[in-house]
Amino acid sequence: MKSIQIGNSDLKVMPINLGGNVFGWTLDQAASFKILDGFVDRGFNFIDTADVYSVWGGPDNKGGESETIIGKWMKARGNRDKVVIATKVGWDFGDGRKGLKADYIRKAAEDSLRRLQVDSIDLYYNHIDSGEVPLEETLGAFGELIQTGKVRYIAASNVPADRLKDSLKLAATGSYPAYQALQPHYNLVDKAGYNSELQAIAKDNNLTVFPYWSLAGGFLTGKYRAAEDLGQSVRGQHVKKYLTPEGLAIVELLQELAGKYQTTPAALAMAWLFFTPKVGAPLSSATKESHLDILASVPGLVAKIDPADIDSLTALSDKMVYSSEK
């Protein structure tokens, strides 16, 4: 596997990004440690989390559970220098903690550093930009964190195209730090948002792209074929809109190609992402060793897949229509 350089930074990561949203939610600490161990044992090093993960996990969850587990794991393994850690700020915890005001960013960063038990965050994301805070204030706060060594580089997720462009213009003045990466919602059945403007911005500004929801909440694995399948997991209702003839046609082709390449629909769906310019390391969580095996197979699959098969998947993706049924 070849490493990926993030934007214009000196950060290099292997081409799969492990999502940490399941740590402290569907996985307890022991199970999370097992997944993290398995991920690095397979040669990967890029771990993604957020301060808000996983506030939705139950009555005892207050947010920060994922960061705390990752921090304990790094301390137990003594491997901080071998992994690249990305976390995020800005999402609404539901208790007043949210947003991108400077004072909040400073406090949130300190909280993340404490939970992660690190001196510096490798990649710090603006998790969501509602447009309520002046860009100068947000980027200024990020700049302070970089200057003090508490953050190495910054990135953007869930940011409107106009805000991203304006942020990069400010950075070009030399007075503010520049985003080095973009984490958009992007997959075979949900690509319009990224393709509309964000893809061009990423290309023009050398932003490395780390798509999240790479498997569309599990829909692209083939586990959801009908409404009665939606109860299989906590994400079932989130994929209901994909249960259309167009969505199922994509799943059918993934299944067919999985036989051709002796792989899985999930691996193929992730491999497809690499054929989009600037995509560096798709984001996916894992709750089982078998999931890690699938992730580990993706880089090799990318190297051997026929571009004509990628074109066939893209053609179906271009025709995607969502269900309007609630």
Image (cartoon, helix red, strand yellow):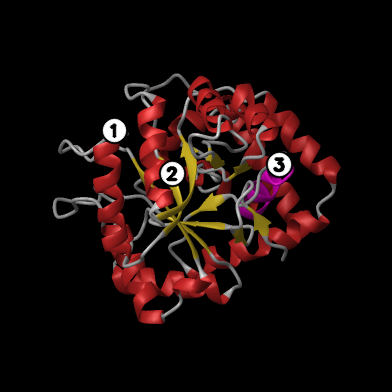
Q: Is residue 86 above or below residue 155?
A: below
Asked if marks 1 and 2 touch (Cβ < 8 Å), the reply is: no
Where is residue 124 shown, x and y percent of the image?
43, 48
In the rendered structure, find residue 295 and report the number of the disc placed on it: none
The reply, left or right, for residue 21 in relation to residue 318 is: left
Per the image, the residue denoted by label 1 is 101
From this viewpoint, is residue 24 visible?
no
Residue 259 quadrant: bottom right
- As drawn, the residue found furthest toward the bottom would be 77
Per the image, the residue denoted by label 2 is 125
Q: Is residue 164 above or below residue 208?
A: above
In the rendered structure, find residue 253 and report the number of the disc placed on it: 3
Where is residue 24 shown, x and y percent of the image?
29, 60
| Residue beneath the point at 25% across and 36% down | 98
Amino acid at circle 1: Lys
Separation of residues labelled 1 and 2 (CA atoms):
14 Å
The residue closer to the viewer here, 215 or 107, is 107
Residue 99 lies in the magenta stretch: no
Magenta span covers which residues? 266-276
